[in-house]
Amino acid sequence: MNILLAMIPAFFWGTTYAVTQFSLPDWPPLLLGALRALPAGLILLAMKPNIPKKRDWGILFKLGSINIAAFFSLIFVMALTLPSAISGVGMISVPVFAMLAHWMVSKTQPKTIQAIFGFLLIVLAWLLFDPGSISLNPLGMLAMLGAIICIIVGSSITKALGSRIHWWSVLTWQLILGGGILAIAAGIQALISPEIYIEAFHSFNLTHGLGLLWIVILNTVLGYTMYVWLLQRMTVVDFTFGGIANPIAGITAGMLLLGEVFTPHQYALMACMLLCSLMPQIIGLIGNRSTLNKEQRASSISDKR
């Protein structure tokens, strides 16, 4: 049941790219990031008011800068420059980059099964993103790489916090601080290039409003709240299975909202990438259950004696 619940935030996150291209195609990424983060953070603060301790402001500001300000900006650059399906599928390579980062920085050697499927994922991504078979915006690809780095660095900082700061405070204040940074950056950009902001506000319509509501309420408030709530009640491995809904939502939303169509070969590569991203967790889960069953049988035999 928890895995099904984990699919809900993953699904909404996967729709970000198509919903943005469909409803907010000409809006600046900095403005979109600010409008996604700051209202969501304030709503969460109103739901459960809290003020961080003085010693925690520094780390929260750092998290807000990386997890929200930088990450949200890059996500919206991806959303406006890459096909929705490619953005969704490409982001499942995060574990591979995290594995390589831990290997190089912490000298933590990956498990054999992780290395095998990580290598296969890289090969499949190379085939899928081959310029000879699909035309992709270089800026969008760089934004994807930057977003992946933000996830790895931000997750490492969050993990290092442990239980020092309550998860609700971390969630709320990184959104508020990150949204504040984006709002300032958007304000500076508006002073330098006011035309795109004037056009965005003058042409505001129902489609724009519904797109913003989807991104703020469903993708952020509901999505992030469910994410941190579920992580208190299930393992990271189990939560990973729910994450399969992210790229599937990206592919489906791209087809329905944007009319994105790929060749059967490209869809096959996407499906293989999804499978490779899940196989280490599936094999690990099977191994853990097998070990547990053996221990239970051994305990049962011992008790009978």
Image (spheres, rainbow, N blue to C red):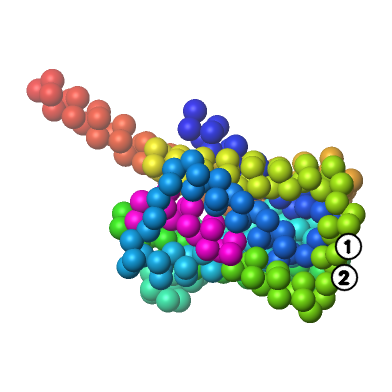
The location of residue 223, given as percent across then percent down, is: 58, 43
Residue 290 shown left or right of residue 191 in the figure:
left
Task: Please tell me which residue is depicted at 55% across the width and 50% down the height of the picture.
Answer: 42
Please identify the quadrant where the C terminus is shown: top left
Residue 171 located left or right of residue 148? left
Residue 100, compared with residue 118, is above or below; it is: below
Q: How many labels sit on residues?
A: 2
Q: Nearer the viewer, residue 271 or 40?
A: 40
Residue where numbered disc 2 is placed: 195
Q: Callout 1 environment at 10 Å: few (<14), some (14 to 19), or many (20+)?
A: few
Q: Quadrant of residue 97?
A: bottom right
Residues at discs 1 and 2 in contact (Cβ within 8 Å)? yes
* x and y percentages locating residue 210 in the rendered image: 78, 42
- What secondary structure prevails in the magenta region? helix
User: For mark 1, what is the residue?
Assistant: 199
Q: In this picture, which residue range is highlighted in magenta?
A: 165-180
Residue 285 in view, yes or no: no
66 on left or right of 194: left
Which residue is painted at 74% across and 74% down in the image? 189
Q: Is residue 189 magenta?
A: no
Residue 283 shown left or right of residue 30 in the figure: left
Report the front residue among 24 and 305.
24
Secondary structure category for the residue under label 2: helix
Q: Secondary structure at mark 1?
A: helix
Q: Tell me the quarter of the picture where residue 104 sits.
A: bottom left
Whole-percent x and y of residue 276?
Answer: 60, 51
Task: Give the residue type that dot 2 points to.
Answer: Glu
Residue projecting furthest to the left: 305
